[in-house]
Amino acid sequence: MATPVIMPRQGQTVESCIIGEWHKKRGDRVKTGDILFTYETDKAVFEEEAKVEGTILEIFFEEGEDVPVLTNVCVIGEEGEDCSEFNPKLQEEDLTSRQGDIHTQESASGDNGKLENMRSHPGVNIADIKKGYEISVPTEEDAKRLKISPRAKNLASRTGVDYRHADPTGPYGRIIERDITALQETGPRVTLAAQAEYKDLPVGSVSTGTGVGGRITTRDLEVASLPGVSIEGEEYEDRKPSTIRRVIAESMYRSLTTTAQLTLNTSFDATEILNYRQKIKESQEKLGLENITINDMILYAVSRILLKYRELNAHLLGDTIRLFTHVNMGVAVDTERGLMVPTVFHADIKPLNELSGEVVRLSDMCRKGTVNPDYLQGGTFTVTNLGTLGIESFTPVLNPPQTGILGVCAITRKEKERDGENIYYPALGLSLTFDHRAIDGAPAARFLRDLVTALENFPILLAE
């Protein structure tokens, strides 16, 4: 029996996913557990395995298409089985074949001239005409207007294709989805102004252009005709940003244009936590501890101090500020796909060793692209660390609707006076960005002051 494979729902807020790569093709025999395709949300990449054994009878979506969750993606069954009932595009295609952008509707009863005219139009059922049904007939004005199905228009928008160049194959000259797909694969495109000159050139002499959608323009032909100059092998590369890059860009732009951000910078004497870190390393294997890092200690201290400054552990929602009882700590993670911020829920009640282990687990899943999207939301405060890259000071950008984010900087050597002598000490920088609409500078500064005190006396903080 034919079995459809649906696009899974990864997290409660995910509405659609993008097909990444097909590992199987139509007609392939698959076993239970075989990887069928990869798909991605705006934050992670997943693999979909075959749940049944059989042959891939049909694939409904290609790589790069955005597919709503719980929609049939392909069908597995036995060769020869009919799987048309599972095709999510069939209903729309049927609708497209019956509709057009036609304005004139006339009844055919009692008019032989109109009846003969209708016979020449595809898709018109003469039996329906004789029954007196109202039939839509395309006029000359309709034929001149460019018609495109909603699905084809959406595909053109997603792929950046100018659908005006498509060769329509649908009813009444309507552009449908397969026409847009064909346009993507037809190779070089030439602007109208450059077509005459382009025809006189040797085949393949100019294959890419600088016009819209890579079209070859008259300027491209002029450059190609210059001695020793060719537009082959451009000196730049146009690359469409990935899904996650677009999401990050939109989020950062919204953050900087809709919030009142201010950053405070300070540093603390890291001698105490460096000594504590060394003791942990010496006893880690014996005590079965996680690989607790300096960043883990900072996360631990932040989660405790934040509870006294609730306006920093909050969401600003229009004219309402939502103050959280627990700290859901967002931890910025650098991955090959871009910045990801998984959430350690209730970080304020987790012991240091447990907190460290969860950060490692979430970070690994982000880098592998297997993190559940539910872990990429719900944060109430974020910590981002660029100190490991040698950055001594920076300005973190808020992650709305959060009201605060802490940047962890590199350790530098600073000088201070102690017992009448100048000594050098390891100073670790901290940069706090906050939303001035939710909290003033003075309480934000007090948060930093208390955090510095806690970190400089870390063993005491652990004892509380």
Image (cartoon, rainbow, N blue to C red):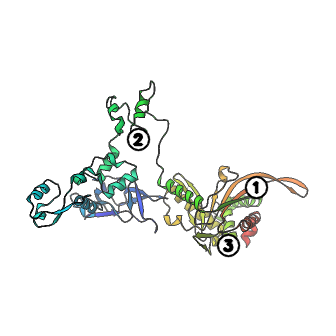
Horizontal side of 71 relative to 95 (left or right) equals right
Q: CA distance from mark 2 to mark 3?
A: 55 Å
- Mark closer to the chain start, 3 or 1: 3
Q: Position of residue 340 (x, y in %)?
A: 55, 58
- Total numbered labels placed on residues in the image: 3
Residue 213, image x, y percentages = 40, 44
Q: Nearer the viewer, mark 3 or mark 1?
A: 3
- Mark 3: which secondary structure? helix
Amino acid at dot 3: Leu
Report the residue marked by disc 1: 427
Give, as a three-letter code, the residue at label 2: Gly
C-beta proximity under 8 Å, tags 2 and 3: no
Give the quarter of the figure containing the N terminus. Answer: bottom left
Q: Nearer the viewer, mark 2 or mark 1?
A: 2
Q: Earlier in the sequence, mark 2 or mark 1?
A: 2
User: Disc 2 designates what residue?
Assistant: 214
Earlier along the polypeptide chain: callout 2 or callout 3? 2
Place of residue 346 in the rendered image (x, y in percent of width and height, measured from the top left):
60, 71
- Return the residue at label 3: 307
Residue found at the far bottom of this picture: 325
Q: Is residue 265 above or below residue 163?
A: below
- The residue shown at (47%, 43%) is 238
Q: For the point 11% across and 58% down, which residue is it? A: 115
Q: Is residue 308 left or right of residue 79?
A: right
Residue positioned 59% across, 58% down in the render: 256
Query: Within 10 Å of the Cα at label 1, are there few (<14), some (14-19), or many (20+) other Cα atoms?
Result: some
Outermost residue toward the top in this view: 227
Which tag is nearer the camera, tag 2 or tag 3?
2
